[in-house]
Image: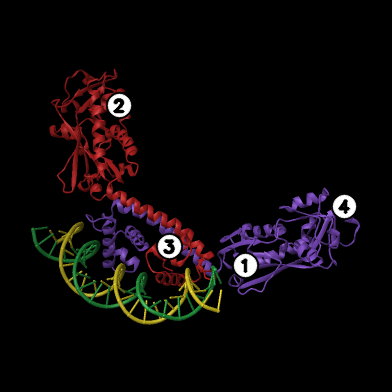
Chain colours: A purple, B red, C yellow, D green
Amino acid sequence: MHLELRHLRTIRAIHETGGLQKAAESLHITQSALSHQIKGLEDQAGMELFVRRTKPMRLSSAGMRMLRVAERVLEEIEALEAEFDHLRDGSAGRLHITLECHACYDWLLPVLEHFRRAWTEVDVDIRPGLAFNAMEALEREQVDVVITSDPADMPGITFAPLFDYSPVFVAAASHPLASKKLITAEDLADQTLLTYPVDRAKLDVFKMLLAPAGVEPAQQRKVELTEVILLLVASGRGVAVLPDWVMREVRYHPDYVTKPIGDGKLKRRMYAACRSEDAVKPFMAHFTKLARTEAVKLQGNKGR
Amino acid sequence: MHLELRHLRTIRAIHETGGLQKAAESLHITQSALSHQIKGLEDQAGMELFVRRTKPMRLSSAGMRMLRVAERVLEEIEALEAEFDHLRDGSAGRLHITLECHACYDWLLPVLEHFRRAWTEVDVDIRPGLAFNAMEALEREQVDVVITSDPADMPGITFAPLFDYSPVFVAAASHPLASKKLITAEDLADQTLLTYPVDRAKLDVFKMLLAPAGVEPAQQRKVELTEVILLLVASGRGVAVLPDWVMREVRYHPDYVTKPIGDGKLKRRMYAACRSEDAVKPFMAHFTKLARTEAVKLQGNKGR
DNA sequence: GAGAATTATGAAGTTGTCTCATTTTCAGCG
DNA sequence: CGCTGAAAATGAGACAACTTCATAATTCTC
């Protein structure tokens, strides 16, 4: 028994119009075609789907069972086709994001909260599990956006700049380094460094400060959550280097001191990477715009 | 965009096997056919459903959306096909019943309670609304069984005898007719007769007693529920003629008297009518057997 | 970078579905 | 009762769509 949607559409049409003749019109085929079709269908089903004792003919009890499935299934199919219409005109789509940068949850979550209200038909999600191979996941359409500060020249991938930030050193107010004006790589050589649990290559403090100077911290402790890093810093269990926007809450808190690192002019730029074909979609443009706006709010706190 | 199940099967197969090649095998067609097919599908969808940057190819985000629908829909379709297998071998079906005889609920409901446990895949229902045109509804497959005591010689309809019963006169113990041994048509000429609200032709008391004698009761009051008829009888608001099995509960109750009617030998036979094609089905045979068994229980109460 | 594996493409063939023309069936009605 | 018209069934042929076959173009693997 090999059903096709054609059969379900036929069943439904005959039921709705109440006869072969009219059903044929509504399906834009001939009555003959329908007659042949249901004959074939009944052969496959091995039973009569229609009652011929009456004219026009109506569904039999077996036919009614098929009708119930037909109505449910066709509704799904039609919803799918409508969804594809929306995909084509850009009002629907998928926005699955992965981030190489832990601290970005700070601004990303508010952005997504705004976004999902504006684009109810876009399926939004964060996929932390794919962060390790983020760019590859983007190419394979496992995700649609990668938040990164390492743009690469890749064909088919577009990097939209979001905002600039500086990595900032943070320590407890009572910490010996609190008196220094500027933090150098060597200052960290005898420190416990608190970082996110990611590859060193993804950590600003290694890539921009320690690696160039060939310095290794006395100890590195990996911590998942920003709040916990700050907690450990405050209690003198280590020091950290975090993006400046993270510091907005604690910059003027008496327990902490923040210091510029390196020459104090280290700047990084955050990007949203997506496949170039998606870059032109309206919801994608809106997403990057929202991300920039949210970042500005955070930057605005700097001068407080 | 004109989707067919073939497309959904293809989408699912490619996803499950992880590539065109293997999917083609599992669908028993060539890889070339699949390649052509998805090309046509993508043309219709107006977008890419697969990511070709990788080999083997995988679903794109739009393709994933289609996959979700495909999985739901195909599950329904496969369940339907399985259901039809059961319909064919007779372990599934529909048993929609209508009754011309109100009192039959007494034994029918216990029967259906047994039945539905034994035949979980048979859809059981009672359709009181179709009682007026019961036999026509049976022919048109609006119902599958008619409970009736008027067998007719109809082509394609089989009448299975269930049990015999006698219509019995019932009145309040204090009623003037309580002293009579036998009730005749004339006895009812000055009585209020309580009946079910159906056509006179379907009422035993008219068809077998009053009509032949050309007698009309003083008054006829139509009451829906058996319990209410008995209540009204007990309070002296009228008399009734009911099937003997209905009386099992009240026969020896001090408020009531029951009397034979006519010559006291009036017998009626109850039948289950179904379409002859259904009569051979195992669940239908089981239903009539259950009905007979249940009736015997009631008849057994007679001699209590 | 060669070979294997995977997908794409073009042409030809086959299958299945539709249309057209006609017949059969059935309900309604004089 | 037979006529009449509408509805459904049937058979033959046309046609489109899907499939296969053969082969080219990619991409992956070692």
Left or right? Give the position of C3 relative to B118.
Answer: right
Judging from the image, mark 2 belongs to the subunit labelled: B
Q: Secondary structure at mark 3?
A: helix
In x, y percent, where is residue B31?
41, 69
A52 with respect to A260 (left or right) = left
**CA separation, marks 2 and 1?**
75 Å
Q: Earlier in the sequence, mark 1 or mark 4?
A: 4
Q: Earlier in the sequence, mark 2 or mark 3?
A: 3
Residue at the spot of label 2: B230
Disc 4 target residue:
A173
Q: CA distance from mark 1 to mark 3?
A: 28 Å
In terms of depth relative to the viewer, which is nearer, A3 or A65?
A3
Q: Which mark is residue B8?
A: 3
- Viewer-nearest of discs 2 and 3: 3
Q: CA distance from mark 4 to mark 3?
A: 63 Å
Q: Secondary structure at mark 2?
A: helix
Q: Residue at x 56, y 64 (%)?
A: A93
As measured in the structure, the alpha-carbon distance from the residue carrying label 2 to the one carrying label 3 is 62 Å
Residue A122 place in picture, x, y as percent: 57, 62
Name the amino acid type tagged 2.
Leu
